[in-house]
Image (spheres, grey):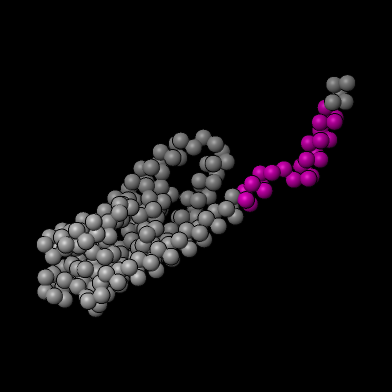
Amino acid sequence: MTEDILALVPVYGLVVLAVGTFLSCLALPVPSSLLMLSAGGFAVSGDLVLWQAAAAALTGAILGDQLGYQIGRAGGRYAARASRSPRRAHLMEKARRQIIDNGGWAVFFSRWLVSPLGPYVNFAAGAAGLRWLRFTRASVAGEIVWVSVYVGLGALFADDIVALGQLLGDVTGLLAALAALAVLGLWLRAALRQRDKLRPGPIRQRARAAIAQVTNRRKE
């Protein structure tokens, strides 16, 4: 399937690039990185114009990020209304604050350094209520890096695009897995701390026991 998609690049060129990066930013299984590498290679051979290929890929990626953000924003409102548990609402609010405080950098690095996480960061940023302007700035900056690196590498290593694509895919996949593990570890630590806070301590337990004894004596 990947080979069939790549075969469309010299035929439909800019449209394939824009649609490919757009769909990949919505978590659809499109080999957008390989498409951009191929576009760089085709630009060297004269089938495409380098700056036009980069502009098409960048446009699709930015539009995909925006749609993902809006989807997350709509879903976040629904999740907030559906959460009736005070504890769950507290955890959701804490996660939301974390994204708002550090969301700009998360959006930026998830565009290119850990690109497999990019679509999910879009959804999370929208759901958490990260300001649109802040999201857009980080998104555009990160996508410029992503497109420039992949289209540029495709032009520099036009003869080894497939091998280069596999190598970059392995590296970004590993980094994404490590980032996901780090986020999971932080979330678990926060959840355990919250549980410890909600669990009654020894002093509170003794106070409750004393109150219960006094109440029982009065009843007797």
Task: Specify the principal SS of the magenta part.
Answer: helix
In this view, which residue lies farthest toward the bottom?
156
Q: Quadrant of residue 200?
A: top right
**Left or right relative to 206: residue 131:** left
Q: Nearer the viewer, residue 84 or 9?
A: 9
- Where on the picture, by quarter, is residue 133? bottom left
Is residue 104 shown to the viewer in this render?
A: no
Q: Position of residue 20 (x, y in %)?
A: 23, 57
The quarter of the rendered structure image containing the N terminus is bottom left
Residue at the image position 50 percent from the left and 55 percent from the top: 98
Residue drawn at the location 37% of the way across and 59% of the way down: 116
Nearer the observer, 127 or 182:
182
Give the residue furthest to the top. 220
- x%, y% of residue 73? 37, 46
Residue 210 shown in magenta: yes
Q: Position of residue 218 (x, y in %)?
A: 86, 24
Q: Which residues are magenta?
A: 192-215
Residue 36: horizontal and vertical position, in percent?
Answer: 24, 66
Which quadrant of the structure image shows residue 217?
Answer: top right
In this rendering, position of residue 68 left or right of residue 44? right
Quick check: 97 above or below 162? above
Q: What is the quadrant of the C terminus in the image?
A: top right
Q: Identify whether 74 is placed above or below 36.
A: above
- Horizontally, residue 123 falls left or right of residue 45, namely right
Count up the numbered dots.
Answer: 0
* Res 143 visible: yes
Residue found 80% across the figure and 39% down from its top: 207
User: Can residue 200 be found in the magenta stretch?
Assistant: yes
Seen from the viewer's position, the closer of residues 38 and 206 is 38
Residue at x 28% of width, y 64% of height? 33
